[in-house]
Amino acid sequence: MHIITGKYKNQKIKTSEFIHSPGFVFRNALFNIIGSAVLNSAILDLFAGDGSFSIEALSRGAKSAIINDSFKKNIIIAKQNVEKICEDERILFMTNFEKSIKLPSFNKIDLIFCNSFNKDIGITVDIINNIKKQKGSLKEIIFCAISSKEEMDLLHDSYSDFEPRRFGEFFMKVLSI
């Protein structure tokens, strides 16, 4: 796997058998959908795995990223990718995660990637509801949900503004919260 475009174009991303990550076509489609919203944005990458979504966003002009994964092995791989590709960027790593994640200043987050594939069914809706409560009436956040069909069906029941897109076994939905 590699970075698609931007200042880190073609840089290889290290991954492992523990990380179930969407490939090139999926990432390219997602970034085409969010378009210029990534420019100068602050990223929150939940279930980040190898950190490929954050690194791709930084390559395309994001200003900072919080890479969060509950598995320390994944954070180690994400840190190795950052050190190899973009160590000069503003990146914070977090290894804790709960459905009721508490992060500093949601008013500073512009874009959230949530790759909940192979996680508890219902976790994405729980995360969105929790973030909405915490952020209150602050600015809208673009939320990019990446999940299984079962998880996406639950998400679609709660947020039915448009149909999710399918890429192989992965489903994607981008919404404002």
Image (tube, rainbow, N blue to C red):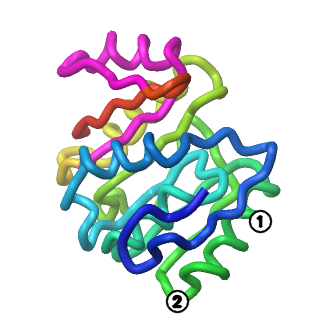
Q: Who comes first in sequence, dot 2 or dot 1?
A: 1
Q: Is residue 173 above or below residue 162?
A: below
Q: Is residue 24 above or below residue 63?
A: above
Give SS at disc 2. Answer: loop
Residue drawn at 43 percent across, 62 percent down: 4
Which element type, helix, strand or loop, lies under badge 1?
A: helix
Q: Quadrant of residue 80?
A: bottom right
Dot 2 corresponds to which residue?
88
Quarter of the rendering occupied by the N terminus: bottom right
- Type of the residue with mark 2: Asp
* Residue named by callout 1: 76
Q: Which residues are magenta?
A: 141-166
Magenta residue check for 152: yes
User: Furthest residue to the bottom?
Assistant: 88
Residue 112 image position (x, y, % from top left):
39, 50
Q: Closer to the camera, 65 or 164?
A: 164
Question: Whole-percent x and y of residue 124?
Answer: 48, 29
Q: Residue drawn 62% across and 40% down? A: 98
Instruction: From this view, report whether residue 61 is shown above or below residue 169.
Output: below
Point out the image quarter for the C terminus.
Answer: top left
